Image: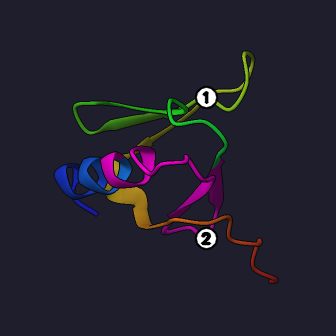
Amino acid sequence: MRRDTFEEALRRVNRAAPFRHYTVELVSGECLIAYHPELFVIEDDLVIYEPSDKDLTYFDASCVARVVNSVVPPRRR
């Protein structure tokens, strides 16, 4: 996904009233859950996911496959 497309998708799900948890699925199949609207930060093409004070995940915006406005259960392998 292009950075601008990802930013627009995040804007839309983060502005939902009331806020609902959502999922960012990466092309690897990994799903990142947003329980708060400020868990994803975009700096240029770098995305920072911070689900807790200790955990940080960095990835390129092009690694995003889709943004789903609900919590997606993990896929079985």
| Residue type for callout 1 | Glu
Name the side, left or right, on which 65 lies relative to 46: right
| Residue type for callout 2 | Gly
Work out how far the residue at label 1 is from the one at label 2, CA to CA, in angstroms: 19 Å
Name the side, left or right, on which 29 lies relative to 48: right
In the image as oriented, which residue stretches furthest toward the top?
A: 53
Decide: few, some or many residues near mark 2? Use Cα within 10 Å; few <14, some 14-19, many ≥20. some
Question: Is residue 31 placed above or below 32 in the rendered structure?
Answer: below
Residue 25: image tag? none
Residue 4: % across, % down: 17, 50
Chain-order first, disc 1 or disc 2: 2
Q: Which residue is drawn at 51% across and 62% down?
A: 26
Question: Is residue 20 placed above or below 75 in the rendered structure?
Answer: above
Of 30 and 70, nearer the camera is: 70
Residue 42: image quadrant is: top left
Of 75 and 21, nearer the camera is: 21
Provide the secondary structure element on which disc 2 rests.
Answer: loop
Give the magenta part as a residue range. 11-33
Q: Quadrant of the N terminus?
A: bottom left
Q: Quadrant of the C terminus?
A: bottom right
Provide the secondary structure element on which disc 1 rests.
Answer: loop
According to the picture, the residue beneath numbered tag 2 turns out to be 29
Name the side, left or right, on which 66 lies relative to 5: right
In the image as oriented, which residue stretches furthest toward the left?
A: 4
Q: Residue at x 63, y 27 (%)?
A: 56
Q: Residue at x 34, y 35 (%)?
A: 46
Mark 1 or 2, closer to the camera: 1
According to the picture, the residue beneath numbered tag 1 turns out to be 50
